[in-house]
Image (tube, coloured by chain):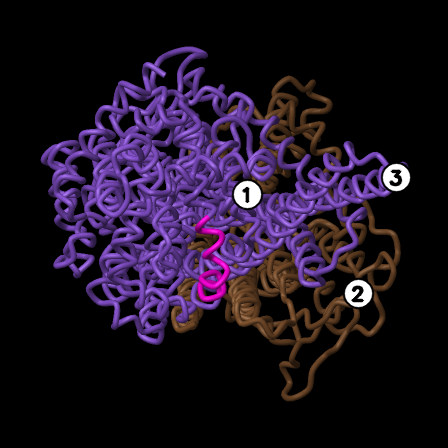
Chain colours: A purple, B brown
Amino acid sequence: MASSSERSPPPFPDAGDAAGRGSDEEDGDDLFSNSSLSETPTVSQPTDDLLTPPGDATAEPTSDRVSSGLGSKTSSDNLMSPPSDVTSDPISSGSESKTPSEPSDEFDDLADNWMTPAASVDAKAGKGASENLLNDEFVDLLGNETEPQSQEGEGESLFAEIADPKQEVKETAPLLDLSSSADLAPNPPSKIIDPLAELFDDPPPAAAQKQSAAADLFEDEGSDLFADPQQIKTANPPQKSLFGEPDEDLFGEPLGAKKKPAAEDPRDEPLADKSASNDSGKASRERKHDDIFAADAGDPGDSSRLNSRTNGVHVDESTDIFAEATVELSLDSPQSERKKAAAPAAAAAVGKPSTSAATSVAKSQTAMLEELEEEEESELEDKFDITISITDPEKIGDGMTAYMAYKVSTQTTLSMFRNKTFTVRRRFSDFLGLYEKLSEKHGPGGVIVPPPPEKSILGMTKVKVGKEDSSSADFVERRRGALERYLQRVVTHPSLIQDPDVREFLERDELPRAVSTQALSGAGFLKMINKATDAVSKMTIKMNESDVWFEEKLQEVESADQQFRKLHALVESLVLHRKELSINTASFAKSTAMLGSAEDNTALSRALSQLAEVEDKMEQVHQDQAANDTFGFAELIADFIRLLGAVRGSFDHRMKAWQRWQDAQSTLQKKREAEAKLQWANKPDKLQLAKEEIAEWEAKVTQFERDFDRVSATVRKEVLRFEKEKARNFKKQIVKYLENLLKSQQQLIKYWEAFLPEAKAIA
Amino acid sequence: MSFFEEVKEEAPLSVHGHSIKVAEVLQDGDALTFLIVSQKLSGTGEYHVDRTYEDFEWLQQNLFNQEDVPGIQGVIFPPLPAKAQMNTTPKATRQLGFLGLEEFKPYCAALENFLHQVAAHNLLRKNKALEIFLTSSDPPGRQKARRNIFNRLSQAVEEMRKEGHKDVDEFFQTKRDVNLSITGCIKNTVDKFLDLVQTEQKIAVACGHFATALHLCVESDDDPDKAAFTKICVRLSDVFESMKNSMASVAENDVSTLGLGLDLQSRYREAEKEMLFRRTCKLVELETALKNAEKAKPVKKAALEEVKKTVETEFNHVCKVAKQEIEHFEDARVKMLQQALVKWCEKQLRTAREIAEQYDQHLQAFRAM
C-alpha cells in the first residue's frame, strides 16, 4: 500500500492538473511536461504529426502517449511519464464530466496501466457511441497486444506488467502507479475490468466491424472480445488474473472486477465523454464501418488514425495501430513498464479516437479506411522496414564459463524505435530468453513463435575449449546465421514486433540476465518440442476435429516435416561431399606439386606446379560452395524444421484451448445435473448456490469456446502466414544461393582460362 | 596420344595402325568381349574381330617373347591394363583406377591405346602375333600362354635383390632414380585424382537425390502460396538436376582426359621401370659372366668367354634399344601429358561455361518468379 500511495502521488497531480485544465489536451500537455521529461514531449510531437488531427487536444495527447509508449522501451521514465499523462488526460476529461478526483488516483494508476480501461470507462460514461468507439479501441489495443491472447492474454500481460511495475516502481511513476494500483488491487483492477468489460460489451458491434475490417489477427481478437458481453466478465477476470491468476480467474471473478471498474469508470468516462461528446455521433457511424471501426474504433479519428498508422508502423493493420501502441506500451515495461506502456497506448488510442472523432467525426468512412488498410497490408509484405544483422561473434571469458556474444545491429525506419540504427551486444542465452518470453506470452494464443537455434553442448564445448579448428568456426558461423534469421523472423512478425520484450532486446543496452534458459538448453529444448508434438498427436486422437481445415493442415505439417527432414539429410550429405571434394582437391594439388617437383622436364614441371596452384584456388571455391550449400540450404531447411515444430506447437495450443473448453463443458454438465438433483431434493438454499455456479460455468464455457475460436483463428492465420513466408523465404534464399553458385562457377571459369595457356605452353 | 610415331618402313601389318578401334564391349557373365575394328591397308573394308582379355594377354606375351629381335629387353612395352573384374568390389575398382569407372568406357579406351602403341612401335609392330590378333577370325589367345622370363611374379622376387644394384652407366643410373621417384609421385597423383573424381560423382548423385526429393514437396493445391512453393520446388529441382549433370560431366571430363592420361603415364612408368629392371638384370648377368670368364679354368675358359661375349652383345643391344626407347618415351610422354592437360582444361572450361549459363538462366527464372 505504501508503495502504491507513493506511486499514486504522481497520478494525483496529473489528475488535478487535468481537472483544472479541463481540456484533455491541456491535461495531456501538463502530464507530459510534468511526468515526462523533454524526451516524451519530443516523442509526442512526432506522434502528433502522425496523427494529423493535432488540432484536437485529445489527438495530441494520444499521440503523445503513443509516442511515449513507443519510446518507452528505451527509457522507462519516459514511458512511465507518458502513460501517466495519458491517463491523466483521460482522467481529467473524465473528471470534468464526472468526478475526477476520486477516480483520478486510481486512474492514474489504472489509466497509466490501462489506456483501454479508461476508454472503457468512457464508454460506460453513458455515451453509447463513444463507448463503442472506446471499446473498439480498447479491443484493438488488446487485440493488438496479444492477438491470440486477446482478452485473457492482455489481461494477463497487463497484470504481469503491473506486477513488474511494482517491482520496478522506482523506475517510473506510472509504472509504480500501476503496480501500486495492482497491489492495491481493488481500484486498479476494477478500472481495468471496467474498461475491458465495456470493451467487451461494446465490442459486439465493433467486433463485427473489426472482424470484417481486420481480417487478420486483430479481427479475431477484436471479434472475440467484442462479441461477447460475457467477455466483460472475462475482462474483469483478466484483471484479477493479472494480479493473481490467468484466464479462469478472470472469468470467474468478473463480477467483483466489474464493481470496481464501475467506481473507476468515471475517470475513464471523462475520456469517453470527451470522445463521446465529440464523436458520439461519429462513433456510432464508425461502428457501422466494421473494418474501420475496428482499427479505428475512434472512427471520427479514423482518418487521423489511419495516418498515424501509416506513419507509425507499416507492419500492422489499422487495428494494429492501436495494438501497436498498446504493445509498445507493454513492451516498454516488459515487466512493469508494459502496463504503463499499455495503459498510455490504450489511453492514447482512446484519446485519439475520441479526439479524432470529435474533429473528424464526420469523416469516418469505412471505405477509405479499408483502402488504407489494404494498402498498408500490401506494403507490409515488402515493407518490414527493419533489418537485423548479427555480427562479430566473440568469445567472452575462458574455460567452461565462456560464452559467445554477438553484436545485434538493427536498422529500421519504424517510428516505434527511437533511432534508425542501433546496436547491442547479446549472448546466446539472451536469445533463448527472448524466445521463452515470447512463446510464453504469444504461444498460448496460437501464434507461431519462431524458434531460436538449439543450444549445442558439443559445439559450444569445442568453442569453449578454444579449439580454433574449422568445425568450431563452422559452428559459430552456423549459429550466428541461425540467430540472425531467427531475430529477423521475430521482427517481421506483425504481432511479435509489437512485443515490448522484442524492443527491449533490440534496444536496451543491458539486458537482465536470462535466468531460466537452462531449461531450454540443448536436449531440453528439443524434448520440449517433441513433447509438444507428442501431445498434439495424442490429443488429435481424442479430439474429434470439427474443422477439416485443421485436420488437413496438421497432416500437411507432419508430412512437410518429414520431407524437410529428408531434404535436410540429403543436403547435409551433399555438404559432406562438397567438403570432401575440397579436401580431395587440396590433396590432389599437393600431389601435383610433388609430381611437378619430381618431374625432370622443366616445361612440364612448371605447368604441373601451376596446376597445383590452380587446384589450390579451386579448393577454396569448393569450400565456399560447401559453405553456400550449408548456409544457403541446409540451414534454411533446418530453420523450417524448427518452424514446423513451432507450427505444431501452435496446433497444440489450439488443442489445449479446446480441451479447456470441453472440460468446462463437462463441468457445467455436472453442475446442471447437481442442480437438477437439488431441485428434486427440494433444497432451495443450496439451489441458489448451484445456480450461481451454473451461471459462472456457463460464462466460462462461452469464454473458453470463444478462446478456442480465437486461438483457432489465430492459428489459421498464422499457418497461412507461415506458408506465405515459407515460399517467400525459399525464393529469396534460392536466389541468393544461385547467385553464389554462379559466382563460384565464374570463378572456376576464370581459373581454367588462366591455366589453359599454361598447358598449351608446355611443348 | 600415341607414344611413338609411326615409322615409315615396310609394314607387315595389313591394317592402318591408327584406325584400330575397340568399338564395343560386350558383357557375358563375368567375361568381357571386345569388338576390335581396323581398316585394311589394301583399301576399303574393315576387319572385325572379337577378342577377350586373354587374347590381349596372348598378344602381350608374344611381344615379350620375341627373342629373335636383338635388344628386345630394352623395349618399354606398352602396358596392358589389368584385367577388368566384373564384380566391381571397391577394391577391384581401386586396382583398376580410372579404368574401372563409367562402365569400362575408359577401359576400352586404354585397350585401344595399347593396341595403338603396339602398332606404332617400330619393333613390335612387325610381330606376327599382332597381325593375327587384329585380323584372324579365330581367337588366338585361348591356349595357355607360355610363361617367360618376364613373368612378373619372379620379377617381384628378384627385384628386391637387384633393384639397388649399382649401375655402370650414369645415364641409366639417373633414369632409374628418376623413374623410382616419379613412379611413386604419379601413382599418388592418380590416386588423389581418382578420389577427386569419385567425390564429384558422389556429389552428382547427391544432387540427383536432392532433385528427386524436391519433387516430393510438390503439392497439388489451389492455394496460391502453396502453388508458389510447389513451383519453387520444381524449379529448384531443375537447378539441382543441372547441377547433377554438370558435376557428372565434370567428372567425365576428368576421367576421359587427365584421368586416362595420368593412368597411362603411371602404367608407362611402370613399364619403363620393368624395362630398366630387365636391363639391370642383364647387367648383373653380364657382370657374372665377366667374373666367371676371368676366374675360369683354362678348360672352360673358351666356353665362358663365349658366353660372356654373347651376354655382352645382348647387353649392348639392350642398352642401345633402351636408350632409344627412353628418349622416345620422354618425348612422347611430355606430349601426351600436355595433350591431356590441354584437352582437360578445354573440356572443363566448356562445361563450366555451359553450367554457368544454365545457372544464370535458373537465376533469372527465379528472380522473375
Q: Horizontal and vertical percent for residue A390? A: 32, 38
Question: Of marks 3 and 1, which one's residue comes earlier in the chain?
Answer: 1
Residue at 67% over, 76% down: B38
Residue B2, can we see it? Answer: no
Q: Which residue is mark 2?
A: B33
Q: Which mark is residue A677?
A: 3
Q: Which residues are magenta?
A: A198-211
Residue at 56% over, 52% down: B264
Q: For the residues tagged 3 and 1, is the chain the same?
A: yes
Pick the front one: B222 or A271: A271
Quadrant of the image occupied by residue B18: bottom right
Q: What kind of secondary structure does the magenta stretch mostly adopt?
A: helix
Residue at 34% over, 18% down: A396
Q: Chain of mark 2?
A: B
Alpha carbon distance from label 2 to label 1: 88 Å
Alpha carbon distance from label 2 to label 3: 97 Å
Q: Chain of mark 1?
A: A
Looking at the rendered image, the disc whose residue lies closer to the viewer, 3 or 1, is 3
